[in-house]
């Protein structure tokens, strides 16, 4: 594209080119914000097959509401060219970072893989398979040159351009849209069953993500060579060992990569979340949010997770002023109001005994209810204890900002799945989302990326509502200040 304007968009600069078109940094004059604008090439927009594939990308990405999946603002056609308006993500893609700086420290690689796994798990939950998981589709934000801090790096998964519904999907999107003669994925990361013509399922993404884990640890793909050599390696050669590809990589990663890259999909991890959890376990990390520092002297293990505090009798206020409800029907006791001066009289002792008996009775009822709940609950069942909500960083005086709102969910350390939903003070809400909690994890973070634009100063509040395994609700906010 050579013109400076494309419909309501003012083109700033080219960000990249792909097989379907080009991506530009552009300014949307309607919403007054900077976006990433993907435009299908003019000679391809008229091709029905390409056009269907492009529209499917938009619909597929629009279904997924997860912090690590780049959301779309809109799509359509302008002057005969199809376009996709997406959030602009600043940063560097993982492939470029590895070429520039070499292998990642294991803790950073595990953090990156874990966040991509969250994005893919959300896509799989919606019945979609990415099918093109590779380093260049993973954008790293909050990095400092060669330094990738596992506790602050944020990874966004890009390009659902060949995402397709899983087997069993219905409707127009269930059609096979890969072009005849085109390889359905990137040859360095493609699952072997895809080369045999099998449609693939989430385990195909597990294979590709295991390839990326190997490359993050060693700065090179698991197999190299021309296209025939790569296809033969994925089909027949055993997975390489990252500890051999790069001295110093813990040998425990060898088994993780071997399982993730198993030739038989049935022998792989069933989900990308389990692949990420196994990678964390090599470093002794039990939670996606536990940072591990790797230095020349070795690995510093994370501090032990604190034991969950017993639920108080009434809703507490957190350090940030967020009030948390521990499900419906929480019983509380009301303190006896003080008597005004001068009203003290000689009451019969039996009245005092009745008052004391009433208080003790109330306490016994509460204790009995708690014991009944604990006895009814299976010991190995996941339970949410509390939650808190706060922005990762205050936006400060700024216009057109995206705020990462973090919900910290405390659990009892059992494995299971959390179902939750976000509600915003502007009336918008997410769909019901899920997050897998590995065994031994006591804290899980869930994210809401909230983009605000326009002028003015106002308070914004996000409410996290945990729906299962038990209801818990928390809210937190920040101030948008654009003047």
Image (spheres, rainbow, N blue to C red):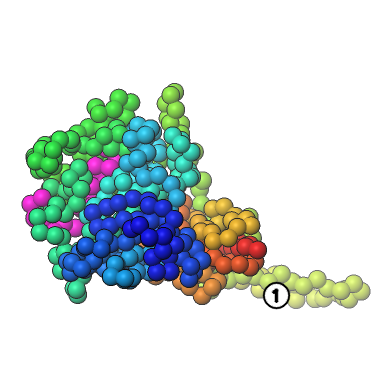
The quarter of the rendered structure image containing the N terminus is: bottom left
Outermost residue to the right: 342
Along the viewing direction, whichever of 228 and 442 lies nearer the viewer: 228
Q: With respect to residue 244, does 172 lie above or below?
A: below
Residue at the outermost front position: 3
Residue in the image at 24% along x and 42% along y: 211
Q: Callout 1: helix, strand or loop?
A: helix
Determine the main secondary structure of the stretch shown in magenta.
helix
The residue drawn where x is 62% and y is 62% is: 482
Query: Residue 37: percent from the left, percent from the top?
Result: 38, 60
Is residue 243 shown in magenta? no
- Image position of 165 (left or right of 62): left
Front-most of residues 282 and 38: 38
Residue matched to label 1? 354
Span shown in magenta: 195-214
From this view, report whether residue 366 is shown above or below residue 404: below
Q: Residue at x 54, y 53 (%)?
A: 392
Q: Which picture quadrant has residue 214?
A: top left
In front of the other: 382 or 425: 425
Q: Is residue 224 among the parts visible in the rendering?
A: yes
- Report the front residue among 177 and 11: 11
Task: Provide residue 415's location: percent of width, then percent of height.
Answer: 36, 54
Q: Is residue 466 visible?
A: no
- The structure residue drawn at horizontal position 45% and vertical position 50%, both measured from the top left corner, is 90
Question: Residue 265, position in %: x, y?
Answer: 15, 50
Give coordinates of residue 183: x percent, y percent: 14, 52
- Is 88 on the left-hand or right-hand side of 171? right
Q: Decide: few, some or many residues near mark 1? Use Cα within 10 Å; few <14, some 14-19, many ≥20.
A: few
Side of 291 relative to 244 (left or right): right
Q: Is residue 198 magenta?
A: yes
């Amino acid at each position: 594209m050579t013109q400076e304007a494309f419909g309501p968009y003012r083109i700033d600069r080219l960000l990249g080119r792909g097989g379907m078109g080009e991506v530009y940094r552009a300014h949307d004059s309607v919403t007054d914000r900077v976006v990433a604008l993907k435009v299908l090439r003019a000679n391809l927009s008229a091709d029905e097959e390409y056009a269907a594939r492009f529209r499917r990308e938009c619909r597929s990405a629009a279904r997924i509401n997860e912090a690590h999946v780049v959301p779309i603002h809109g799509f359509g056609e302008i002057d005969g060219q199809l376009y996709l308006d997406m959030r602009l993500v600043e940063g560097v893609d993982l492939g470029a970072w590895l070429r520039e700086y070499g292998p990642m420290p294991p803790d950073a690689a595990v953090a990156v893989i874990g966040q991509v796994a969250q994005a893919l798990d959300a896509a799989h939950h919606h019945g979609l398979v990415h099918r093109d998981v590779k380093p260049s589709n993973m954008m790293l934000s909050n990095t400092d040159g060669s330094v990738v801090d596992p506790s602050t790096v944020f990874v966004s998964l890009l390009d659902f351009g060949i995402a397709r519904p899983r087997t069993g999907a219905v409707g127009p999107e269930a059609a096979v849209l890969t072009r005849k003669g085109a390889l359905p994925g990137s040859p360095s990361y493609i699952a072997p069953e895809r080369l045999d013509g099998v449609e693939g399922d989430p385990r195909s993404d597990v294979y590709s993500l295991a390839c990326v884990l190997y490359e993050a640890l060693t700065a090179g793909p698991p197999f190299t060579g021309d296209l025939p050599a790569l296809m033969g390696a994925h089909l027949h050669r055993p997975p390489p060992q990252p500890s051999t590809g790069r001295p110093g990589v813990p040998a425990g990663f060898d088994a993780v990569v071997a399982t993730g890259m198993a030739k038989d999909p049935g022998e792989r991890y069933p989900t990308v979340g389990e692949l990420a959890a196994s990678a964390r376990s090599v470093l002794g990390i039990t939670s996606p949010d536990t940072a591990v520092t790797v230095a020349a002297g070795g690995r510093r293990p994370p501090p032990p997770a604190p034991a969950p505090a017993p639920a108080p009798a009434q809703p507490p206020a957190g350090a940030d002023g967020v009030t948390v409800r521990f499900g419906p029907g929480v019983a509380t006791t009301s303190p006896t109001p003080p008597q005004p001066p001068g009203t003290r009289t000689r009451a019969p002792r039996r009245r005092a005994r009745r008052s004391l008996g009433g208080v003790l009775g109330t306490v016994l009822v509460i204790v009995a209810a708690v014991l009944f709940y604990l006895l009814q609950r299976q010991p190995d069942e996941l339970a949410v204890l509390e939650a808190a909500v706060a922005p990762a960083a205050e936006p400060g005086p700024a216009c057109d900002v995206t705020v990462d709102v973090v919900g910290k969910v405390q659990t009892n350390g059992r494995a299971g799945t959390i179902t939750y939903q976000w509600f915003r003070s502007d009336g918008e809400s997410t769909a019901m989302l899920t997050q897998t909690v590995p065994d031994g994890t006591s804290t899980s973070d869930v994210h809401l990326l909230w983009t605000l634009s326009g002028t003015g100063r106002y308070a914004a509040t996000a409410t996290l509502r945990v729906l299962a395994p038990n209801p818990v609700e928390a809210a937190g906010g920040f101030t948008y200040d654009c003047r």
